[in-house]
Amino acid sequence: MIGLSEADVRMCAGFPSATADAGGSGQIWTYQRTVQRGNLIVVIPTLAVGAIPTVGGSLNVNPGGYCNTQLRMVDGRVAEVAYAGDNNTPNNRDALCVSTVDACVAYARQHRQVRTGATSR
């Protein structure tokens, strides 16, 4: 995403949820994404047979959360990308932020091919 213009970012990510002036460091655009918490609850019944200890328990998985993808815009172009929020899933770091970046990376590749006539293999 580094180097994309403001117009390119609006095309691939939409309009930011919030913007802030970063003084002499340009502007910060924030894209907010919230994924509702879903629950997967597995309960293992408690078993006690004579002298055997009690066996039981439960598992609760909450894959939801929120992500703020923050872009620092300097001179009308993306200069830095950072993430904030509860955006990790059990298997991936920053997983809830990936959709904004992925869409813009795909857009940049397609846009570059159109401009240069290059094809990727």
Image (tube, rainbow, N blue to C red):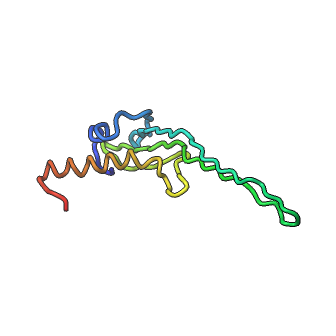
121 lies above or below 82: below
Q: Quadrant of residue 90?
A: bottom right
Residue 26, given in percent of the width and then of the height, sits at: 38, 41
Measured from the top left, where is residue 9 in percent x and y? Answer: 31, 41
Which of the two residues, 54 or 108, is positioned nearer the viewer here?
54
The mark tally for this picture is 0
The residue at the far right in this view is: 51
Please state if 79 lies on the left or on the right of 39 as rendered.
left
Q: Is residue 62 above or below residue 30?
A: below
Q: Position of 56 compared to 98: left or right?
A: right
Residue at 41% across, 38% down = 29
Q: Position of residue 30 (x, y in %)?
A: 44, 39
Instruction: Find residue 62 and report its horizontal and vertical position in percent.
Output: 59, 47
Please give left or right for residue 63 compared with residue 81 in the image.
right
Residue visible at 54% across and 44% down?
A: 64
Tell me what residue is drawn at x 45 percent, y 49 percent.
82
In the depicted view, which residue is nearer to us: 100 or 116? 100
